[in-house]
Amino acid sequence: MPIGQGVSVTPLQLASVYGAIANRGVWVQPHLVDHVQGERPPAPKTRRILSAGIDRTLVQMLKGVVSDTGTAEAASIPGYSVAGKTGTAQKPGPHGYEPGKYSATFVGMVPASNPRLVVLVTVDEPHNAIFGGVVAAPAFAQIASFDLQYLEVPPDLTVR
């Protein structure tokens, strides 16, 4: 869960859970090596963590975060449906939370109708603004837009 004081996950854990949501509820164990020349790669471990029905509902909710009524309109990409979530966390210190020190996050998937990408952006101790929807969401949009073009992923929305 990318929200809530006192709840913590690593970026890899967070990205892998959103990968599972993008994968219709099936988690795939993160791995670094795709293949070694001349050898058959081992199959990654997988596990269903959400039913298909719950996953569809969750994706619809995450799409609402990026719509004009959500907290991350800056993550939208023309022509593509985007689903994701913002996070803003005060950083803990040795004697409680550190005043004025935050981590701002946006993690999302695109195109939401048939995800090809999961992108996680975390800004450590941002300046001027602290909210994930303001600080991290625009970076998500830039990174994902470039990647969609590079991968030649066709738009899934009609641009108005």
Image (cartoon, rainbow, N blue to C red):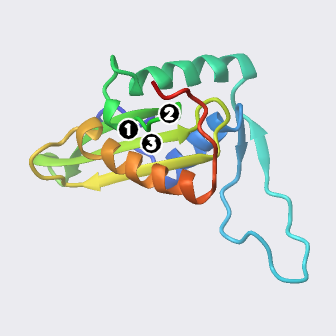
The answer to which of marks 1 and 3 sits earlier in the sequence is: 1
How far is the residue under mark 2 from the one under mark 3? 10 Å
- Tell me: 156 left or right of 38: left
The answer to which of marks 2 and 3 sits earlier in the sequence is: 2
- Tell me: 92 left or right of 49: left
Count of numbered marks: 3
Identify residue type, mark 1: Ala
Instruction: Give the SS element for disc 3.
Output: strand
Q: Which residue is mark 3?
A: 107
Q: Residue at x 23, y 39 (%)?
A: 134
User: Who is closer to the viewer here, 67 or 120?
Assistant: 67
Q: Which residue is mark 1?
A: 75
Q: Which residue is mark 2?
A: 82
Instruction: Give the SS element for disc 1.
Output: helix
Identify residue type, mark 2: Val
Q: Residues within 10 Å of mark 3 (few under 14, many from 20)?
A: many
Q: Which mark is residue 19?
A: none
Q: Are marks 2 and 3 in contact (CB under 8 Å)?
A: no
Residue 20 location (% of width, % of height) = 66, 39
Q: Looking at the image, which residue sits at the far bottom?
A: 37
User: Who is closer to the viewer here, 133 or 87?
Assistant: 133
The answer to which of marks 1 and 2 sits earlier in the sequence is: 1
Q: Are marks 1 and 2 in contact (CB under 8 Å)?
A: yes
